[in-house]
Image (cartoon, rainbow, N blue to C red):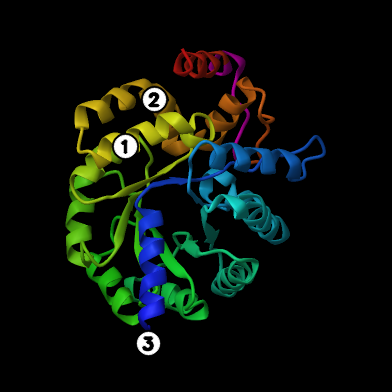
Amino acid sequence: MTGPSDNSRFEALRSALADVVAIPVTPFADDGSVDRDTYRALIRRLTDGGVRTLTPNGNTGEFYALDPEERCLVTELTLEEAGGSGATVLAGVGHDLPTAVAAARHARDAGAHMVMVHQPVHPYVSQEGWVDYHRAVADAVPELGVVPYIRNSRLAGQRLAELGELCPNVIGAKYATPDAAAFAAFARDAGLGRFVWVAGLAELYAPAYWAVGATGFTSGLVNVAPEVSLRMRDALRSCDYPAAMEVWERIRRFEELRAADQSADNVTVVKEALAALGLCRREVRPPSRVLPVERREEIAALVKAWSS
């Protein structure tokens, strides 16, 4: 059961999702460990730049390349650094169900406001099992908003509707299937007004998804150029699609490089851009790779053009 205070709190969280949802990178030090000082500096840069919703342990943060202690550390650092800014923290959780539940409880105890549940990567995912998995996480942290990360194009919208009936704290969905028509149908089958719909494929898909129901979008680009992502958000909020598409044209090549080869260089391109700005080492963990020199030069030129 939820009372009036719960509803008020969840409404504030719904507003936080209807925004640019930043996915911070996880920088690594010379010895390969998480670079705590650089991570803090990158979080400050985001919040100082006007970003108000942060997802530590997202895919752009190399979630699957971090060990459990590192994932806890990243959540804690985000909360410590963003605490005075008023930013909302949506911590990523996932893996096997006990690990996901433990991570959600850790995020709650550390002070996070919501958890994003990564798409289950088990090779055998039934639709009923998808509901059971997310219900177990949501039931473990009824105080937190819960946001499923949907990358499975076979999942029916009715399943999210079912989950929402069972778990009032499931308040939004990050939808990341590259098909705007499929998203539009899914959102309406699940309940367009019941959930906050976050376009999970970043700025490249944000205008199309916004036109059919999304009110927020995720971003890795925001690590590099917060003002560019916020400009697109403001244009979309004003229904100024020509202005949004002007931003889209500027970042198109950057996002295409990230999306190429089934997003093989998704994280690497962002870290390379940060390296070009002198903000972060370019190193990533396998199975990602450092980019070849000619690609690095192209990314440096793109970043320079954004500031001109």
Q: Amino acid at mark 3?
A: Met
Q: Is residue 35 visible?
A: no
**Which portion, as a residue range, is magenta?**
287-296
- Find residue 31 and report its horizontal and vertical position in percent: 82, 39
Find residue 10 and report its horizontal and vertical position in percent: 39, 69
**Position of 251 compared to 86: left or right?**
left
State whether residue 12 is above or below residue 28: below
Number of the front mark, 1 or 2: 1
Q: Amino acid at mark 1?
A: Asp
**Is 56 displayed left or right of 10 in the figure?**
right
Q: Which residue is mark 3?
A: 1
Contact (CB < 8 A) between labels 3 and 2?
no
Query: Magenta stretch: dominant SS?
Result: loop
Disc 2: which residue: 251
Kind of residue sitting beneath label 2: Ile
- State the separation of the CA atoms marked 1 and 2: 16 Å
Q: Is residue 14 above or below residue 280?
A: below
Residue named by callout 1:
234
Residue lying at 48% horizontally and 33% vertically, measured from the top left? 226
Crowding at mark 3 (Cα within 10 Å: few <14, some 14-19, many 20+):
few
**SS assignment at label 3:** loop
Name the residue nearer the viewer: 261 or 147: 147
Q: What residue do we see at 54% from left, 73% from top?
A: 97
Q: Determine whether the residue tagged by mark 2 lies in a helix, strand or loop.
A: helix
The label nearer to you, 3 versus 1, is 1
